[in-house]
Amino acid sequence: MTGTLDVKSFIDDRGMSARQWLLTVLCFLIVFCDGIDVAIMGFLAPAITAEWGISKSAFGLVMGAAPVGLAIGAIFAGSSSDLIGRRKVLLASVFAFGVLTFLTAYAQSPMQMAVLRFLTGLGLGAAMPNTTTLLSEYVPEKRRSLLLATMFTGFNLGSAIIGFVAAFLLPAHGWQSVLHFGGALPLVLFVALLVFLPESVRYMVVRNHPADRIRAVLASVSGARLDGIDRFTLTEERVESKQPVGVLFSKNFALRTFMLWICYFMGLLVIYLTTSWLPSMIRDAGMPMQTAANVTAMFQLGGTIGAVVVGVFMHYFGAQRAIAAAYLLGALALVVLGLSGLESAMLAMIVAVVGFCMSGGQTGLNAFAPGCYPTQARATGVSWMLGVGRLGSIFGSSIGGVLLSFGWDFKGIFTVLAIPAVLGAVAISITALSARRSGKVAQAKA
């Protein structure tokens, strides 16, 4: 090969190298550690409140600190990689939430713990959008949806694994040991990332890095010999702003930006209201705690399977069609859930279908979003979607209690939840129209 090479076409036209598979595994492990850290305090709250002699409401400050930090971290720290690079931000993020989780074990008061959890959330917020962005820029387009969707199953797996770890460590070693485990794991991963995590060559082209540096990284990742290449280009949609945030709100991208926000917000609203309040509704109906836990677990199980299936459908039928279908089927399943009631013999199965559709569609959206933006603003676009969308999780977690206090019953709440699911399907469909209308491209060179 001699002369000029378009890096996107080069990656898309080749199979996966061993280094690309290794990168996929590393990104899966980052998301896995992310899932552990997000879920960890839920398993430790009873032990900590008992030891400190405080009420659950007093501990609410600790529980709410990480999600707030996560939303802020997603918007600001997450988008910083469009300016300084994916590798640097990911390394800093994993190191930060590992150290801060470890230090949380030494907190002496709810306020100290809340501050540490907020700072941990900042690190967690930067991890997800940059993991998504980096992997999307290194895998062939024909495999992208499935590999990204599979990567995101690491989050559910991590959230589940930490429950078993907590059950094993808590009785003998106390809640501090679980935080030590949750902090040590990403620090071990950090060492592997330091050695094996590459910078994005697409980012390097856009930022005009030297051609010899781009050649070395791309050759290492792809396993190909690129000795004759002295010029690297990247053909993408034309941008009207040099600032990443400006790209999001420019003429060609503003509509899809807002539609992605709406879709992500609606999906998280449904998911968090369901997972936060379904166990309480089941217990209030007189069913045992074990039933509440098992039924809610079916939502997570369905979501994990749904993530992979939706990823496959995205590959064969198109991303927008697959995600929109998942949300619409989720809306139908929510109506069936509400009309069937808590006494239904099929309750667990229906809840699993809701999780399959809604969490599957949400994971599909995570995989779809990076392709909606050019390299110059990709991490910013994904991180802002995740950050703004997090408001949906906060709203969903809180609105359930408000509706119950107003006298809404199970049927009313879950049938009405079909509305945001439908709105999510409409929003993701509109992004397709936006992309088709602005199909102009420009060429970056290095």
Image: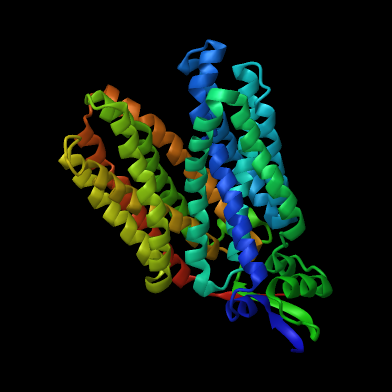
Outermost residue, front direction?
Answer: 172
Q: Is residue 324 left or right of residue 168?
A: left
Outermost residue, top direction?
Answer: 53
Instruction: Find residue 58 and report its horizontal and vertical position in percent.
Output: 51, 16
Q: Is residue 386 left or right of residue 183?
A: left
Quadrant where the C terminus sits is bottom right
Decide if residue 200 is in sight here.
yes
Q: Which residue shows up at 63% across the image and 46% down it?
A: 126
Instruction: Find residue 409 and report its horizontal and vertical position in percent.
Output: 21, 30
In the rendered image, the vertical position of residue 330 relative to residue 18, given as above or below:
above
Outermost residue, bottom direction?
Answer: 2
Where residue 314 sits, quadrant-wise, is bottom left
Instruction: Find residue 5 and report its horizontal and vertical position in percent.
Output: 71, 82
Where residue 347 sits, quadrant-wise, is top left
In the rendered image, the vertical position of residue 109 relative to residue 355, given as above or below:
above
Instruction: Find residue 38 and report its horizontal and vertical position in percent.
Output: 54, 38
Q: Is residue 412 left or right of residue 219?
A: left
Decide if residue 252 is in sight here.
no
Q: Which residue shows up at 28% across the image and 22% down it?
A: 405
